[in-house]
Image (cartoon, rainbow, N blue to C red):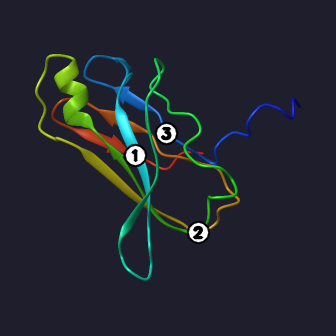
Amino acid sequence: MDMTSPLPSPLTTHVLNTGMGVPGAGMALSLHRLDPVTSAWSLITAGTTNDDGRCPGLITRECFTPGVYKIRFESGQYWEGLGETCFYPYIEIVFNITDAAQKFHVPLLLSRFSYSTYRGS
């Protein structure tokens, strides 16, 4: 293994535009962690999906601890960039991590008027 290459993120996502049958490229998103004491969300990172609809490097293994997280997808901006309107201006997927040693995949499948997600690995 090349020690200069970054380790893969223990948390990944993949946006799929099921309405058009293509990856959700160019969608802005942000990852947040809930502070259990203040109940306030803290921004961990922000990024944009690549041509394959993925956003590598969301979080390092060292920063990935048990807790409640959310990924906020800027779906309204995404559809606007395609010259379309949509029903959901943004989508927030909130999930609980109890075992940070595992790998988690949180995909988003969306069209202009619907979305779904699941816990992958």
Side (left or right) of 3 relative to 55: right
Quadrant of the rendered structure where residue 64 is?
bottom right
The answer to which quarter of the image holds residue 46 is: top left
The residue depicted at 89 percent of the width and 31 percent of the height is 1
Foreground residue among 94 and 31: 31
Q: Nearer the viewer, mark 2 or mark 1?
A: 1
Horizontal side, residue 39 vs residue 90: left or right? right
Of marks 2 and 3, which one's residue comes earlier in the chain?
3
Residue 84 vs 92, above or below: the answer is: above
Q: CA distance from mark 2 to mark 1?
A: 18 Å
Amino acid carrying label 1: it is Ser
Q: Residue 99: percent from the left, percent from the top?
A: 64, 66
x and y percentages locating residue 98 in the rendered image:
58, 69
- CA gap, disc 1 and disc 3: 11 Å
Q: Amino acid at mark 3?
A: Thr
- Location of the C terminus (image quadrant): top right
Above-or-below relation of 80 to 107: above
Three-letter amino acid code of the residue under disc 2? Pro
Earlier along the polypeptide chain: callout 1 or callout 3?
3
Mark 2 touches mark 3? (CB < 8 Å)? no
The circle on residue 13 is 3
In the rendered structure, find residue 66 and report the number of the disc placed on it: 2
Front-lying residue, 97 or 1: 1
Q: Position of residue 83 (x, y in %)?
A: 14, 16
Q: What SS does tag 1 mark?
A: strand
Q: Are marks 1 and 3 in contact (CB under 8 Å)?
A: no
Please give left or right for residue 39 compared with residue 7 in the image.
left
Mark 1 is surrounded, within 10 Å at the Cα level, by few (under 14), some (14 to 19) or many (20 or more) other residues, namely some
Residue that carries the numbered disc 1 in the rendered image: 30
Q: Which tag, 2 or 1, sits closer to the chain's start?
A: 1
